[in-house]
Amino acid sequence: MSTSNIELPAWIEILLIPILNILMALFFAGLIIFAIGENPIDAVRIMLNGAFGYDEGVGYTLYYTTNFIFTGLAVAIAFHARLFNIGGEGQAYIAGLGVGLAFLALDGVLPAFLLIPIGILAAALFGALWALIPAWLQAYRGSHIVITTIMFNFIASSLMVYLLVNVLIKPGSMSPETREFTEQSWLPFMHEVLGIFGIEVTRTPLNVSFILALVCCLLVWIYIWKTRWGYALRTAGQSEAAAIYAGIKPKRIIIITMSISGALAGLVAVNEIMGVHHRVILNFTAGYGFTGIAVALMGRNHPVGIIMASLLFGVLYQGGAELAFEMPKITREMVVAIQGLIILFSGALALMLRPVIVKIWLAIKPVPSAMQHG
Amino acid sequence: MDSLLNAQTLLSTLDATLRVSTPLILCAMAGLFSERSGIIDISLEGKMLFAAFAAGTLAAVTGSAWIALGSAIIISVLLSLLHGFACITNRGDQVVSGLAINVLASGLTIVLGIAWFSQGGQTPALASESRFMPLELPLIESIAQLPYVGPFMQSVISGHNLLVYVALLAVPVTWWIVYKTRFGLQLRAVGENPLAVDTAGISVSRLRYKAVVIAGILCGIAGTYLAIAQNAAFAREMTAGQGYIALAAMIFGKWRPVPALLACLMFGFLDAVSIRLQGVSLPGIGEVPVQLIQALPYILTVVLLAGFIGKAVAPKAIGVPFAKER
Amino acid sequence: MQHQQAKGEGKGLPLSSTPPPDYLASDTNPPGDQSLAIELRKISKRFGSVQANKDIDLKVERGTIHGIVGENGAGKSTLMSILYGFYQADKGEILINGKPAKIKSSRDAISAGIGMVHQHFMLVDTFSVLENVILGAEQSAMLKASEENAREALQQLSDEYQMSVPLDAPVGDLPVGQQQRTEILKALYRNAEILILDEPTGVLTPQEADQLFRVLQALKDRGVTIILITHKLREIMDVTDNVSVLRLGEIVATQRTADTSTTELAELMVGRKLQTQQFKKVDNPGGENGIAVHNLTVTDDRGLTRVDNVSFEVKRGEIVGIAGVAGNGQSTLLEVLAGIQSPDTGSFTINNHQANANSPITPKEMREIGVQHVPEDRLRLGLVKSFTAAESSVLGYQNRKRFNWRMFLNIRSIRAACKKLMQAFDVRPPDPKLRSSSFSGGNQQKLILARELDKSPSVLLVGQPTRGVDIGAIELIHQKIIEIRDANCAVLLVSVELDEIMTLSDRILVMFEGRIVGTMKGGEADKTTLGLMMANALDDAA
């Protein structure tokens, strides 16, 4: 018997099942650690301590979290329009190009209060453009957006290598990166900001783009659920037929949504380049775009869920570094493996437990309410 | 420039083409089986990577190339079954499932590699007895004397390891299975119209499971090739996107074995030639950036998918979980 | 139900419609009758809250053509899907050639000698006819032997029954008639002794249909048992030996075809329900046209003509009902008038705005000019299942000023407006925050109707307003449609429910295969005549 159209109460659908899925993923992660010959419980303790035990750890955790919020939101907004954007990695990378071009041209000329907005806009714009091409190809040429965005990741990577090695490289330098931008273009670090208020914290890469990330969460939430554009986006994602009935153009939704998605992914460049590196370097995206998929799946494409999932991944990244230090047998890549498990259980196998839970629920549920057919 | 047109250089470039094309060919055939059955397989990369790790590990531990090959195939098939369990049994999203396998493989191979061997993710370097080594084709010495054909046979065709020939053989075998056998007929049908297959009294799930298992076997061979035939150890991330290139080649070949082979050879040739072209200026064009040549497979695939050069029509039922009950 | 059986008594077959003997209820079932190819005993199937089949008893004699007729949704296709192993019956028993059979999959059905020609062909378009035929019936692991074997066998079959098909052509390129032959050949190649055809002529030209019937006759002469599912009474009269009528999931009569008539079958099919509501009919409204359609033709993406050169008018203050069996073009017509599809040739004027293939009107513009549309498929078009009722209550109107404040949706005003709609149309429970999918069909429909009528349309397009709706809601929905007519709105109503058409319409048009084949005044319409028109069999019955 099919159980897919039996409705479950909201708390089971949006809390119990996702949590069980994550627990399954973490259980298997524990098994791996156990198989390597370490104690999973100790590992969790070390990770939590590494992530939250002292202020430097917290700073790093939130710095990673910032990237995941951006890429998680990027994947999530596309998901709401039933588009699968695997290209966050490439979009973030090309966004770095946007920031680089803008700053190489302007950083000695303009003051900070102009440079910083320009940098952010350039990141968003270039990220959006890199998503726009696959979107256009999907809407008007029928190419599969999953395949095109994958291809665009590789194309972005080749393009950036070429530009950094041959064009944008700091003259006379051997390493493929741009010159350092002037300090007017730097985003303030959090330890500097807090220092103004007399709060002394250790120096970490955490910068004000964390606040930008939280603002983006709010904006995305407003956009999707509180505006007519979000209404159109969700309608098109749920039912193309209903969208056409309602006078919404599905093709236009694809273009707009993917642009926003690419722009959000592009903001990773704000954190990484404007906030931390202050120059464009190779592979500054470091897989954050792919992690965004796990974050969105885990956070059920809701900004609140995404903040929590990003925080979890922040903990995994920062705590994972600590873990690699404390338990030499375990390396940072453990985080990547856990990410894979989370994509598996929260994504591909998200519905695995549902039939069982439906059966249990039907057996124990309270007397049916008055909401009967009729 | 002269050196490029030199016959010896050409032959060695073709030789290199065949070597770099081998994993592409195996993975493209793997993808073909899976996708012809209606299951999108972006996890070629992950399966190949995990298989390479298994082969490197087992070859180092047991010293036997054959045990390494066997275990690589087993690991890759297990990942295929996981993909099947998610997409066929649980009707999960095929792209998400494939991605999960890729990410999992990327992380876990390094974690386990470092935990077991403490060589920064590498497996120990292998002695030649525990690898697949180049084979001289029989009678090659006498053929080598023939004009044109001789040097080609000697430099390009002969002198590869067994798995290269397995890959080359995989193409006609795939073609034969897909077009000439009962299984192939059913495979092609289930990717186009699973309902028709179901009403003909054939189990859609069983057929799709068979297809993904075959894909697993082929990816297992591809991984083995990378770790213990082309190289002498597993290195972290050694697949380096080749699984995706193979996927692109298979799409470029429009889900057909022989065109997919040609696409693999073309992409392999681009790869082989890109190394030679580094810093070389072509007449009338100037210096072609290596990165452009490296990105060409992806660019060409995008252009093809957009319908600008021919039309690539995927199996009709691809990506759609089969649901019988209403 | 009861009196229908009584009506059939006397001329009904001795083996049908008789109340089941008591021993059937006991555990020891009686042996089956050897002369029957198929016997169904007490087959029941329920989908959620819908009882698709209820206690079906059916006996099909070997070597006959047995027709099964019934309106859309009467349960014909479900019954045949059970017989072919696609669904499992909740209870009941199937006997093939007198022996109990467990049919759990198509494989079981095939090995029991059952072949089926589905309404939507089960063919692989990219395959040749030959490949389609041998799929699943290969003799060995290699194709070559099977292909040669099948080629020979098919040659024989097509000679024997005069149905030649190009064996090596891709099926997707063949005309529908030849695709159907492929399906029949598939079944015969598998040695089917029982052949089920589900609405086989729905997609055929009259000539193709005649050829099909000749083939069926030849098959019958060679001892094949055929079950023909159709809603076309003329076909039943022409080719069947016996006929069973399904209504609302139950068999209401089984008769020898020779002993019945189209008129009787039409009555049995539609049943006689008590008219619960009587509305005043408007005769010859004098007003201007709300809708005027001129020679409209629409083809679908497969190239089939869905609407065929249709012309008619709907005056303001008038309800025009379009009757017809589902799939005869009325849905397409409605979508074209709503701006969702565009016509191929011809034009229409709607609320004084003209549209044709070159200058279509979009759904958005339709709403702006006062054309409101209650779509047929409410779950796919009319609302978004995962949205709250409030969100669904502005579908199509999401950009209107009253629902927005600057760049934001004004959730509060949307909820308030939804609440008002819910109260006016008695939507229960009246809670705008509930998910649209958690409302019953009737309440969903009332919400959609409320949303559209609230905009005071001057033209209203309504499709299947009471499909899957409970009795109480039906009355209210009908009342509201009459009210909007009396407010001088032009109403075009499409429904497959004849009762509904007759209750509401001031004028009735009957569509058959894309054409308008009959017109009646609402006050003068009778069900039998309409039923005959819907089957395009009016001349035959006369």
Image (cartoon, helix red, strand yellow):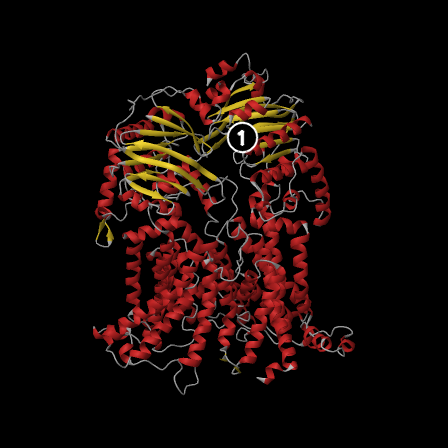
Q: List the single residue furthest toward the top.
A: C10
Q: Chain of mark 1?
A: C
Q: Residue furthest bottom?
A: A172
> Which of these two is toward me, A222 or A63?
A222
Secondary element at tag 1: helix
Which amino acid type is marked by label 1? Leu
Q: Disc 1 designates what residue?
A: C79
- Local packing at callout 1 (Cα closer than 10 Å; few below 14, some 14-19, many 20+) is many
Q: Is residue C227 above or below residue B183?
A: above
Query: Depth check: C305 or B26 in front?
Result: C305
Q: Quadrant of residue A302?
A: bottom left
Residue A260, percent across and down? Answer: 34, 61
Position of C404 relative to B108 (above/below): above
Depth order, front residue of C13/A365: C13
- Residue C175: give x, y in percent of width and height: 57, 41
Indicate left or right for B275 with A308 as reference.
right
User: Where does the image place residue C299, in percent across and percent down from the top left?
Assistant: 45, 42
Q: Is residue C273 above or below residue B211?
A: above
